Amino acid sequence: MDVDLLGIVKRIKPLWQSLTDGGLCVITEGGNSPGSIRGKKLPATVRHAVREKARLEPLEIRGNFWWVISPSPYLRGQVQLVAWATEDRGWKDLLQSWTDMLTIACSETAVADRLTEALVEAWDRLTFLYELTHIAGHATELPSMLNSIVRLLSQVVSAEEVFIVTVDDAGWESVTASGQPLVSPSVLVENVYYVGRPLGLAELKPALERVDSPLAEVGDLLIAPLIGEGDLSGVIGLMDSQEGCFDSSVVQLLASVAEQVGGLIQAAKARVEREESQRLEHELEIAAGIQASLLPTSLPQIPGLELVAYLRPARHIGGDFYDVAEAKTGEPMLMLADVAGKGSPAAILTAVVHATFRGEALHRRDPAELLRLMNRLLHPDLEKAEAFVTAVIVRLESDGRGFSYASAGHADCVLWRRREEKVELLGATGLPLGIDSSAIYRSEQITLDPGDILLLYSDGVTEAENPDGGILGLQGLSDIIDATYPARAEEQIKVIVESLDVYRHGLPLRDDVALMMVRALNKDEEKAKVFPFVIPAEVLFVRQLVDLVRNLSSNLPIRSSKLRRQVADNFALAISEVVTNQIQHAFSGQEGQIHGRISIGSSQLIADLYDRGAPFQPPDRPIVPVDPDDPPERGYGLRLVRGLLDRVETRRLEGGRNHWHLVKELTGVE
């Protein structure tokens, strides 16, 4: 092997070993094939390829990759390059280039020095690209990564200055290998933005001269755009005092580097945003936990009353909340409040309102007096925050027969009267807290009869919006209460929340939802088992209702399990037919909901179904025989429903609702 060629091989072997942790061997014409490289015995397949002077694509053998590279077909010579590495990082093209250069060196010793320089330069650039990925993987912050990149590039290219300019919403930031500030970075970014390719000094000079930039007087200047995911994130450039020192090979290198650095910058920014988002998410989770801890751990137990509360923030934390405290005379004081706004500012204010309510309720009995004092104490903080709070406070009588309330601009409370099956609205009795420090509030005394329901809620309930822009409203809320009574308060609250989800039809929750329900027990209705429900007016969801009814078979007061199942199946079939008929004819493809309840008494199985579809028009279909062991779910008409049940009644209610009342007598069915 020629002495100059030996020098080249001695240069590239250590470089290959340090980068790949592998080994490399050059075989010239007439040379002997090695038996091993760096202690690695050549596999039989590799030895065969060497003997046959054949190429061997990356071949993985026992965790190592092997190459046998022969010269390109147009070259004369017998140089072969045998190499192995622990990983395949696409070395084939590089090894082919080396083989070709070494082949030329064997036949033209006069160009050995130039080839040595070219090989080392190619290697330096390849090493640069490898080190670039190393920097990207280990840099924790974007400025640190950019500093490492410009210092690394300055070792590969012959330039007096290497710089990167990044652009974001805050403006331009420049990083240089020398550490000196870069003048006029905005001109460079603006010009490359419109061209989208590398630009030299000749193309940049007019723009630089227009702004009297010193960069117009340098010897040579080259910049390339940094583009990641289609967006310009800055420029990378080279500068030198010598004229015309950046040739086409440097332009090509800088363009390649810019493409990779642009992606790295985009990835680094995305990582920073992701980490910041995760940090905020974690902090919000902690804040949500703190806010949840402010809610009462239990609600007071009052004879003759059921009391249930529910809170669902639209975000991790919100401005709606409820609380319970004990009045001066021992009665429970309920509060449901809504701090104007969302997110952290509203959440902070809820804590202040919580503390004020709990601290002052112990010394007051009158809800109006408590609101007046809270308003005076909170007014300075609310005024600074440019916020206000709506709140309603209820003091329950210890005998469960009534309550007094006062409302600081809060949404109307709903009082559902069992006797009339109608809603009374209890309006505000004063201004929201924080509007006027001297505001006056008034308390109202209300009686509760057995079966009556008091519902406190935030406007996130009545202002729930569907895809068409309609809102649920007080009428929609009243419909749900009417359709689910006399279910337990906990079940009614559950159906109200489910109804909001159905009404939004997939839209995200836009406002917090807070509910408190007080239900006066009715002893005459406590023996019945009531199962309320809501489904969208879509045939797909009828199955949910069918499954609900069938799963209630074990609750029927019938001794025979087979008979219980048959009665439940027949009842499910009847309900399925009625509901499907309503969906197809009363709604005709329009969105809507069907509310109702299944009631199991000592002698009856009852279903009450409510909807706001078109008035009922009974279809005329013949009766078809039904297999009681495998009953169908729909399609057999109203006559079948009447054949399966003992009573089928439908009526059009005031306000435009349909009500179906279905009854199956259980006495004597055995």
Image (cartoon, rainbow, N blue to C red):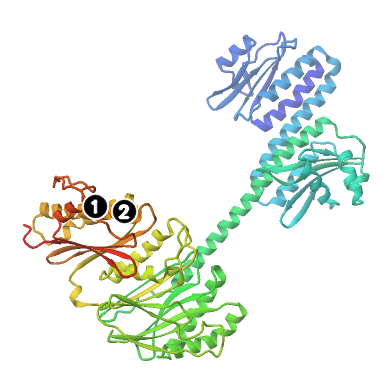
x, y (%) of residue 198? 79, 38
Q: Quadrant of residue 595?
A: bottom left
Q: Is residue 656 visible?
A: yes
- Give the SS element for disc 2: helix
Which of 305/642 is in front? 642
Quarter the C terminus occupies = bottom left
Q: Residue at x 90, y 44 (%)?
A: 206
Whole-Å distance between the Cαs marked 2 and 1? 10 Å
Q: Residue at x 24, y 48 (%)?
A: 634
The location of residue 146, given as percent across then percent down, is: 73, 47
Q: Amino acid at mark 2?
A: His
| Residue drawn at x 32%, y 87% as measured from the top left | 397
| Side of 176 where 651 appears, left or right | left
Instruction: Report the front residue among 543 and 372.
Output: 543
Which sits in the foreground, 75 or 633?
Answer: 633
Residue 302 left/right relative to 339: left
Residue on which disc 1 sits? 619
Secondary-structure class at tag 1: loop
Q: Is residue 135 visible?
A: no
Task: Tell me which label, 2 or 1, sits earlier in the chain.
Answer: 2
Residue contact between numbered discs 2 and 1, judged by CB atoms under 8 Å? yes
Locate residue 312: give its quadrant: bottom left
- Left or right of 495? Residue 167 is right
What residue does disc 2 label?
Answer: 585
Task: Name above or below for residue 37 compared with residue 588.
Answer: above
Dot label at residue 380: none
Counting from the top left corner in percent of width and height, residue 284 is at: 53, 64
- In the image, what residue type sits under mark 1? Pro
**Badge 2: few (under 14), some or many (20 or more) residues near its Cα, within 10 Å?**
some
* Classed neighbour count for the residue bearing mark 1: other residues with Cα under 10 Å, few (<14), some (14–19), many (≥20): few
Residue 237 in percent (x, y) is at 81, 42
Q: Is residue 396 above or below residue 593?
A: below
